[in-house]
């Protein structure tokens, strides 16, 4: 199977910065990039006219909680009418609401809801997505979530990376007992059944302490799971330092991370994942220290954090805009963050995240004539085609 992407205004290769190649074409064979440049179609093949368009590597959404039961727009409305988060939580709202509705949903129901959400991601140009468990909060319910994620991985048109997330302590369960359950039962079971690539822990004052997070992550490391951590979102919990000490693949959120911890993460090769959609959705004042990330030349990734409580944004182009508007990231930084660096945050930099000979032909063709318009034309539905392994999986004029 061969595909020819003809005459793009700009191709963003993501090699050496964003690597803009103007007025060029791409030849794809057997699902991988063969040639990029001023080409003539070498043979009879499926041709996509990309005149007036920007071609970018498919977006990599490296942090989502896409599988869950129910949605929480009622709580959103309550917050807007002045009810505090604490009162909503006391009335059974917040994460407890999602846990309840995820537990009562069947595997089949969760699977079909999530498959519809994935169709939305594809329409917005995402070609790889990480999905975390974490709304089950018991051995059987976390395994149920992971089975759903793995069934999606088999069936969906895009690549799915499953992560087990130790999200929080379930109500009416002793902290120590739950951490022991994760370490002695859950992680061994996940490893034995090969249900996850990564183990992630929410290390913060409202979830697991640094010590508890360390115990969980060390066990996961011993079981050959790769490591991630939700660090320093609501307080300086020491999560970023822990990520550096354990050489986690990525550390995520990082609003309260200090200059020292940013340096330690960089030296340890930890990829920071920033989530500007959450800052926007919750209107949080505290922002990650972009200037220090820039100074240390950290490979900052950005992702949606799609979840029912704090970010229901499917669109990576909108996340790119928000990274610029809210965090003050430069356009080039946000674009690399949504592609190449996000691939690195999933340990997939060898196969995806850039347009290079031999890499998987995952692309998004955007209906704008230069890359600066991607964040600038905020909110516009600009994805014309989404291409996965050389196959068109979404197209506006098809
Ligand atoms: Zn998250």
Image: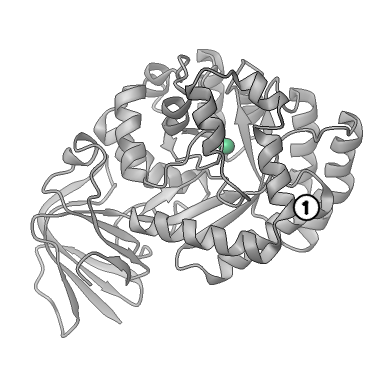
In the image, residue 394 lies at what x, y percent?
31, 66
Residue drawn at 67 percent across, 35 percent down: 95
Q: Quadrant of residue 166?
A: top right
In the image, residue 333 lies at what x, y percent?
31, 33
In the image, residue 67 lies at what x, y percent?
60, 52
In the rendered image of this protein, does residue 261 appear above or below residue 367?
Answer: above
Q: Quadrant of residue 256?
A: top right
Left or right, 3 with reference to 265: left
Left or right, 172 with reference to 372: right
Q: What element carries label 1?
A: helix
Report the residue marked by disc 1: 141
In the rendered image of this protein, does residue 394 appear above or below residue 93?
Answer: below
Residue drawn at 75 percent across, 28 percent down: 208
- Is ligand 1 within 8 Å of the beta carbon of the residue shown at mark 1? no
The color scheme shown is: one colour
Location of the C terminus (image quadrant): bottom left
Q: Which of 162 and 93 is in front in this view?
A: 93
Name the quadrant where ligand 1 sits. Answer: top right
- The answer to whether residue 269 of the structure is visible from this angle is no
- The answer to whether residue 25 of the structure is visible from this angle is yes
Q: Quadrant of residue 250?
A: top right
- Would you call the spot at circle 1 few (<14 residues within 10 Å), some (14-19), or many (20 or more)? some
Location of the N terminus (image quadrant): bottom left
Residue furthest to the bottom in view is 44
In the image, residue 154 lies at what x, y percent?
57, 70
Residue drawn at 85 percent across, 43 percent down: 183
Q: Nearer the viewer, residue 185 or 72?
A: 72
Q: Which of 22 and 154 is in front in this view?
A: 154
Left or right, 254 with reference to 281: right
Residue drawn at 25 percent across, 51 percent down: 13
Number of marks in picture: 1
């Amino acid at each position: 199977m061969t595909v020819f992407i003809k005459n793009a205004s700009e191709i963003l290769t993501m090699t050496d910065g964003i690597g803009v190649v103007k007025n060029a074409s791409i030849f794809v064979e057997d699902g991988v990039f063969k040639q990029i440049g001023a080409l003539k179609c070498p043979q009879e093949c499926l041709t996509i006219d990309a005149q007036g368009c920007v071609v970018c590597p498919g977006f990599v959404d490296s942090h989502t909680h896409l599988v869950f039961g129910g949605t929480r727009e009622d709580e959103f409305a309550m917050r807007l009418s002045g009810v505090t988060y604490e009162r909503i939580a006391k009335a059974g709202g917040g994460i407890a609401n999602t846990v309840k509705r995820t537990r009562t949903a069947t595997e089949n129901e969760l699977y079909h809801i999530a498959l519809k959400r994935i169709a939305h991601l594809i329409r917005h140009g995402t070609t790889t997505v990480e999905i975390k468990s974490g709304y089950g909060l018991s051995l059987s319910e976390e395994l149920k979530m992971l089975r759903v994620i793995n069934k999606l991985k088999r069936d969906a048109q895009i690549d799915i990376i499953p992560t087990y997330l130790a999200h929080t302590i379930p109500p009416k369960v002793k902290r120590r007992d739950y951490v022991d359950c994760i370490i002695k039962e859950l992680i061994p079971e996940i490893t034995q059944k090969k249900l996850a690539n990564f183990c992630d822990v929410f290390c913060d004052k409202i979830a697991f302490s640094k010590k508890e997070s360390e115990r969980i992550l060390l066990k996961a490391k011993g079981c050959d799971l790769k490591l991630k951590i939700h660090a320093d979102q609501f307080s300086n919990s020491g999560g970023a330092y822990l990520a550096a000490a354990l050489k986690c693949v990525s550390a995520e959120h990082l609003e309260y991370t200090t200059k020292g911890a940013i340096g330690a993460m960089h030296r340890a090769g930890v990829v920071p994942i920033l989530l500007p959609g959450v800052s926007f959705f919750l209107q949080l004042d505290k922002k990650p220290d972009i200037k220090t990330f820039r100074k240390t030349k950290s490979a900052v990734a950005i992702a949606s954090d799609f979840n029912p409580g704090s970010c229901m944004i499917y669109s990576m182009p909108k996340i790119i805009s928000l990274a610029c508007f809210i965090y003050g990231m430069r356009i080039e930084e946000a674009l690399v963050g949504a592609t190449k660096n996000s691939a690195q945050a999933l340990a997939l930099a060898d196969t995806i995240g850039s347009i290079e000979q031999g890499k998987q032909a995952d692309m998004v063709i955007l209906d704008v004539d230069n890359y600066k318009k991607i964040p600038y034309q905020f909110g516009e539905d600009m994805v014309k085609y989404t291409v996965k392994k050389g196959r068109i999986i979404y197209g506006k004029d098809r």
